[in-house]
Amino acid sequence: MGNRFELSVVSADEIWANNKIDEGINEIKRIEKLLTTFNDDSETNLVNKNAGIQPVEVSRETYNLIERSLRISQITQGAFDITYGSIDKRLWNFDQKMTSLPDKETAKQMVRLINYKNVLLDNENCTAFLKEPGMRIGFGGIGKGYAAEMAKQVMKASGVTSGVVNASGDLTTWGIQPGGKKWTIGIANPDSSHEIFSKMEITDLSVATSGNYEKYVIIDGKKYSHTINPRTGLPVSGIKSVTIITTNAEIADAMATPVTIMGVYTGLDLINQMKDIEAIIIDDDDKLYTSKNINII
């Protein structure tokens, strides 16, 4: 998935624990094979190849993930959109060669195919159809969290009572540490990602962070995140990082980016209306904002 996964299991039996970790790893590999866009035969690519041509029958698992993704698109008013894969990669490289933003008209033209409403599902036949030729779906905004959640569920079903699945900083926890304490997780400092900005003690919760500190470009002294607003085709600015805390790793992963796109006040307003989900936001001026039930150590 282009991400490093780390799986931890609490057990007095090392061999047993490693076997359980292997089960989690195998589940992640299975999901990667299902969703990847780097394999021509994956269900994702079969749907993309038939954009504007015909519906494609997919597994019920893929169908349900697409359906949940479209629901998140509706909730976030399109700030989350799996059809982001339609964007022309030549527009954005976020490297040292990028010295200016594209003009607004060019950017708008590039994102014209991004529209979750043009993903048509047929529940009875279990098919997905992309209405416009050239459309593409991708699960980069939700797949990592989904894989982490499924790996956790597989290990729990196999008898693991405590553990952590860490998907490149987006993690999900259950149970307790060997000493009886909850898991302590650190939120990265957006100005220095190797430093801890704040800590939280959690269990049976998932945490995901979207930040502009890993991939960005500075143009005329202003920092632009690699996160693209699907409505405008232009990178977002104003927020350094968004951390989502909730009960499900898939939801945590999927909600971090749209809150970044929506901005501090609209994003927090949405989170405060949702159940069992919280957010921590740091803006470009290092001001901290939190949803209503957050308690930062």
Image (tube, rainbow, N blue to C red):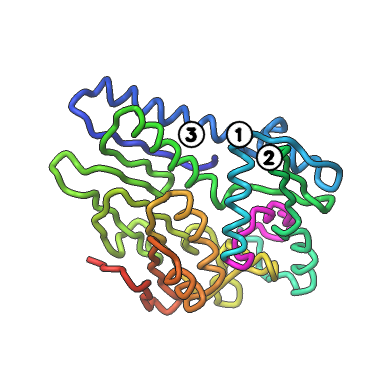
Residue 34, label in figure: 1
Picture residue at 72% right of the left edge, 60% below the top: 115
Q: Secondary structure at mark 2?
A: helix
Q: Earlier in the sequence, mark 3 or mark 2?
A: 3
Name the residue that disc number 3 marks: 28
What is the residue that sits farthest to the top in this orientation?
A: 15
Could you say where residue 173 lies in the image, as x and y percent from the top left? 32, 45
Could you say where residue 153 lies in the image, as x and y percent from the top left? 40, 37
Vertically, is 28 above or below 14? below
Q: Amino acid at mark 3?
A: Ile
Picture residue at 73% right of the left edge, 44% below the top: 122
Residues in magenta, as a range: 76-94
How far apart are the two marked residues, 3 and 2, measured between alpha carbons? 16 Å
Name the residue that disc number 2 marks: 44
How far apart are the two marked residues, 3 and 1, measured between alpha carbons? 10 Å
- Is residue 93 part of the magenta span, yes or no? yes
- Is residue 229 part of the magenta span, yes or no? no
Check whether the beta carbons of the residues at disc 2 and disc 1 lie within 8 A of each other: yes
Residue 267, label in figure: none
Q: Secondary structure at mark 3?
A: helix
Q: Nearer the viewer, residue 188 or 81?
A: 81
How crowded pointer 1 is (Cα within 10 Å; few <14, some 14-19, many 20+) is rated as: some
How crowded pointer 3 is (Cα within 10 Å; few <14, some 14-19, many 20+) is rated as: many
Q: In the rendered image, which quarter is residue 74 located in?
A: bottom right
Horizontal arrangement in the rendering, residue 100 relative to residue 253 (left or right): right
Q: Amino acid at mark 1?
A: Leu
Quarter placement of the N terminus: top right
Q: Amino acid at mark 2?
A: Thr
How far apart are the two marked residues, 2 and 1, measured between alpha carbons? 7 Å
Could you tell me how many numbered marks the image carries? 3
Quarter placement of the C terminus: bottom left
Check whether the beta carbons of the residues at disc 3 and disc 1 lie within 8 A of each other: no
